[in-house]
Image (spheres, helix red, strand yellow):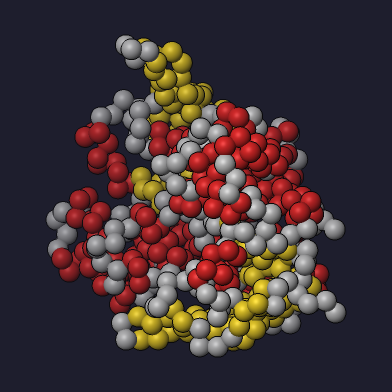
Amino acid sequence: MTEPLLSVRDLSVAFHLGGKTSLAVDHVSFDIARGEVVALVGESGSGKSVSANSILKLLPYPAASHPSGEILFQGRDLLSASDDVLRKVRGNDITMIFQEPMTSLNPLHTIEQQIAEILSLHQNMEGKAARARILELLNQVGIREPEKRLSAYPHELSGGQRQRVMIAMALANRPELLIADEPTTALDVTVQAQILELLAKLKTEHGMSMLFITHDLDIVRKFADRVCVMTKGKIVESGPVEDIFENPQHDYTRHLLASEPKGEPPVADPSKPVIIEGEHVKVWFPIKSGFLRRVVDHVKAVDDVSIRLRAGQTLGIVGESGSGKTTLGLALTRLISSEGRIAFVGSDIHQYSFKSMRPLRRHMQIVFQDPYGSLSPRMSIADIIAEGLAVHEPTLSAEARDRRVAEALAEVGLDPATRWRYPHEFSGGQRQRIAIARAMVLKPRFVMLDEPTSALDKSVQAQVVDLLRDLQAKHDLAYLFISHDLKVVKALANDIVVMRAGKVVEQGPAADLFAAPQDPYTQKLLAAAFDLKVVKTA
């Protein structure tokens, strides 16, 4: 047996806050062989990222400590290594890719400056040699016309391009171990597939080992050689991917494997009233140029889209980032200006002013993608949910308002006694339930759901899908469900609109579209979401 490249032995991580100590990682052990991909899987809070960050000692010390364990890299213990030794290892022998590239890249520096900094620090490479290496790296990770991207800033790139830049930075010094912490979670399914194929190709070309952290078991099955399943700081099961998927031994592993959104959407009734309708909706943003800022062109974010949504029905809007999904939803709810006819419960509203729309707002609610960002951190849950009632039902007494808040929380499966807490005291899934309660407390007829499950673990996704389905059946709600996760859409939507570059490329009943997609773009989306083709390479 050859010695593993990395050996984590009996690792524990404790955090000391406010005089209290909590154990985030509890006696964890795993090895990574040379050229091997090991996946750490589990739900949020299981200890995956804390374990990975311990390898390079990236935790907030001294608040964090290691009551036990050692981390051997090429036989040397990194936990007891000096800062000088760690600085040579970080970004050189071991590198990391993080989940959200926009927060990992410096918004004030160009792509060339950020990659050049790594080459300068670790290889003393400057000038023309550095630029040639940067262009080589950008070519390797599939950035088209890299010469034109050198002067670009992170905000000028798409999510997939930013993640490719992060991979280029990680590969700059030809590391032996790459740690990838949820590198595809925020990406569209097609871009996700491209990134996985890229990582597999680069792993083979460079002979790298990888530690892949994710809560998406489909990715593990496609990509990893071995898997370690974590929950509550412990590894409860580990082994070759095929063994774990075919014959899981631990109850928690079986729970994860069974956590895909399931079931069928409520059957749509064509006799029910039309709640919202859009005909030939357009949202064009002007492009201005020159000294006089004349309009020279338009960004056609939504271009001639027509939809109809009835009570009790879910219309899924799918497509990649930038396809116009959210812009269409904002136009239908009259939060941005648009052209074309928009009708709500039979009344034309496309020419309504902001003031005219206000009485209708209680009947048109939105649940956003990121519940932490959409809930005020300075307000209690009771105040957040009651805010809409104060605006739309000002005659309600304080007691009646509090009673409605408690009822809304109970309806979404939360204990009403928790309503005096603040958002940071809840998990991601609980925060999304709070956001749903905030919408439901006003008893709306139409709800726009903008990627409401994309930031959640698979098991929590399944719970939220079940909740949305139950609420729809109970209140006869019309949902506009915007998502790039086609598995969630399949569990919720009666009809689907597929968008690309502002236009509808295909639309119709969900069952027909999933069974026999007609447009090549739809076929590509479905293949990326449902094809279990293995991208592992020898």
Q: Is residue 205 left or right of residue 89?
A: right
Viewer-closest of 191 and 112? 112
Residue 114: horizontal and vertical position, in percent?
51, 45
Residue 358 spot, x, y in % from top left: 24, 40
In this view, 269 is above or below 234: above
Is 77 placed left or right of 151 in the picture?
right
Is residue 289 visible in this depiction of the protein? yes
| Quarter of the rendering occupied by the N terminus | bottom right
Residue 315 visible in this rendered orientation of the protein = no
**Picture residue at 64% right of the left edge, 29% below the top:** 145
Quadrant (top left, top right, bottom left, bottom right) of the C terminus: bottom right
Depth check: 208 or 301 in front? 208
Q: Nearer the viewer, residue 229 or 255?
A: 229
User: How many labels, in total?
Assistant: 0
Task: Tell me the residue at 55%/80% (across/down).
Answer: 80
Q: Which x, y percent locates residue 187?
A: 58, 48
- Residue at point 29% right, 72% down? 421
Q: Is residue 492 above or below residue 354?
A: below
Residue 215 figure quarter: bottom right
Q: Who's the residue at 44% across and 78% down the image?
A: 64
Where is residue 158? Give x, y as percent. Answer: 54, 39
Q: Nearer the viewer, residue 357 or 70?
A: 70
